[in-house]
Structures are given as C-alpha cells and as structure tokens.
Image (cartoon, grey):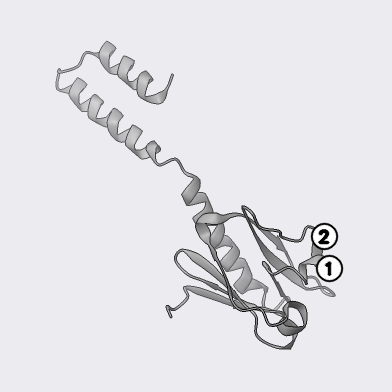
Amino acid sequence: MSVPELQAKGVNGQIELFANKVRIRRKGVLGFLTQGLKGDKEIMISSITSVQFKKAGMLTNGYIQFAFMGGKEAKGGIFQATQDENTVMFNTKQQPDFERIKEEVEKRIQAKTIPSNASSDADEIAKLADLRDKGILTEEEFQQKKKQILGL
C-alpha cells in the first residue's frame, strides 16, 4: 500500500490524498454510526468535478465533500452530509488539514482542465517567430500563420 501525500483525520472518517486519487476511510465509532461497515472509498482525482467545503463553526462541524460524474452526493447541507459517503466531517481543530487537502485537490483539478494544446500553440508560434527572424518567413506569412494557430 502506497503512502499518502497528505492526510486529514475528521470526526467521522479520514481522507488520504495520493498523487492521482483521494481515499476516504471510515474508522472510529462515529464513522461506523454514520456509514456502517462500508470499506474504504477511492475517488480518482481525474473524475472529481468539484469540492464542496464548509468551515467548522463554534457549534457545528464543517465538512468536505467530493462530487464526481455519476456520483450521488447529498445536496442538503450539514445534516445530509453526515450520511453522504463522499463527505467527511471535521471540527475546528482538524480543519487546517482538510483545508490543505481541499487546496491541493483543487490545484490538481485545475491542472487537468488547462488545455494541453496551449503550450504547443506557444511553441509553434515561437518556432515561426524564429523562422521569421532568420528571414525564412516574411512578417506577413508569420502573422497569417500565427492567426491560424490562435484561431483568429
């Protein structure tokens, strides 16, 4: 079993963050009471569409919830979140660990949505500029190809 990059222990479960997935574990009494004898759940980061996060208050727990295509996450706030298998609740002392996981998962979600052709377009334009600078392409040819690459 590989070692998680980040971990957070909550009120009704734990979250472990790996390079390409999130694992939700249910240990402890409250985890058993709210989730029963369910085993660990692993969600691939590539399938996560959003992360809902509610900060803990003085009288209420906070929670982190992962949504993904085809998932049936609870949409009724904290009360339904206690029953949702994609949600882990935490108190104010535990919150910083969950905030770190939330930020890291969101970074990874964002990274997967950046178009992969963005850097290749820039590379292609740089090559064309080099050809222009060497006198192989005219300025007009360069501008025409650049517009074509950028879809203008």
Q: CA distance from mark 2 to mark 1?
A: 7 Å
Q: In this view, which residue lies farthest toward the bottom?
A: 29
Residue displayed at 34% across by 32% down: 121
The quarter of the rendered structure image containing the C terminus is top left
Residue 96: x and y, percent?
Answer: 63, 72
Total labels drawn: 2
Residue 44: x and y, percent?
Answer: 52, 62
Name the side, left or right, on which 116 lies relative to 41: left
Q: Which circle marks residue 28 in the picture?
A: none
Give the quadrant of residue 10: bottom right
Residue displayed at 73% across by 66% down: 55
The residue lying toward the viewer, choosing from 91 and 73, is 73
Above or below residue 132? Residue 127 is below
Q: Local crowd at mark 1 within 10 Å, few (<14), some, or many (≥20)?
A: few
Q: Local crowd at mark 2 within 10 Å, few (<14), some, or many (≥20)?
A: few
Give the quadrant of residue 43: bottom right
Residue displayed at 44% across by 78% down: 3
The quarter of the rendered structure image containing the N terminus is bottom left
Mark 2 falls on what kind of element? Answer: loop
The residue indicated by pointer 1 is 79
The residue indicated by pointer 2 is 76
The residue lying toward the viewer, choosing from 18 and 130, is 18
Residue displayed at 73% across by 88% down: 29
Amino acid type, callout 1: Phe
Residue 2: x and y, percent?
Answer: 42, 78
Name the side, left or right, on which 139 lies relative to 95: left
The residue lying toward the viewer, choosing from 59 and 41, is 41
* Label 2 close to label 1 by CB (< 8 Å): yes
Name the side, left or right, on which 13 lies relative to 7: right
Amino acid type, callout 2: Gly
Mark 1 falls on what kind of element? Answer: helix
Residue 30: x and y, percent?
Answer: 75, 84
